[in-house]
Amino acid sequence: MLPNRPRVLIIEDEKPIRTFLRASLDGEGHDIVEAETGREGLAQAAMWVPELVILDLGLPDMDGLQVIRELREWSQVPILILSAREQERDKVSALDAGADDYLTKPFGIRELLARVRVALRHAAQLGKEEGDQFSVGELTVDLGARRVLLAGKDLHLTPIEYKLLTTLVRHAGKVLTHRFLLKEVWGPQKVYDVQYLRVFMAGLRRKIESDPSHPRYLLTEQGVGYRFADE
């Protein structure tokens, strides 16, 4: 292992996919650790402490959802799912279990590498303190001063809009499910009121986005939730 190269653990039972991922990620400056079963993957994660885990849900010895749950008992390492399961309920289940992102097989390498970059940035932001400032494009969110600026001008948000935005910002690049956002912003009694969330998201987009119908910052993951774009 070379110093200063992000370590990526690939948990995938199909050798051709592992080989393809290893070649692609090695060329981008990553060190690679491989595992072909869930148990082996959990052991490798404990041994090597990777900066990112790429996980297939359909493993021979255990379901990938259980791998996520066991990892989350002791680690907040970003988890990127690569899976042939394309139903929305499978994506929601993985994200609610603690995954950070989800790509459906077959996937394009450029999109994969972009998701890897986002996940690694998310890992670097896990230690953000309340006084930190987050900027992307023309939008700045100052968590310490509780200010939101767009093109250098203060933006007035309602308390709920501010809480919704800062929840997304603190998890920038990560797909957040409807259920997660509703619980974080409104509390457990509102976790099934998806339309409630959509109304507030539409209002927030009207204030932040130059074209709310084609958002730059607040992205929709259809049927799953939302993602704050950090690139």
Image: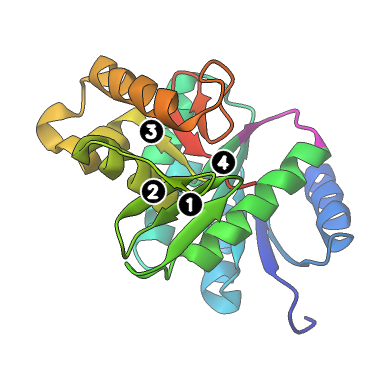
**Mark 3 secondary-structure assignment:** strand
Whether pointer 4 and pointer 2 mark residues with C-beta atoms closer than 8 Å, the reply is no
How crowded pointer 4 is (Cα within 10 Å; few <14, some 14-19, many 20+) is rated as many
Viewer-side label of 4, 2: 2
On the image, numbered disc 2 is attached to which residue? Answer: 148
Q: What distance separates the C-alpha of mark 4 from that of mark 2? A: 16 Å
* Magenta region: 103-108
Residue name at image x 61 percent, y 76 percent: 48
Q: Earlier in the sequence, mark 3 or mark 1?
A: 1
Q: What residue would you read off at disc 3?
A: 177
Amino acid under disc 2: Val
> For this view, does 67 lie left or right of residue 41?
left
Residue 191 location, x and y as percent? 20, 29
Q: Is residue 171 above or below residue 177?
A: below
**Kind of element beneath mark 1:** strand
- The residue carrying mark 4 is 229
Q: Position of residue 13 (x, y in %)?
A: 69, 46
| Secondary structure of residue under mark 4 | loop
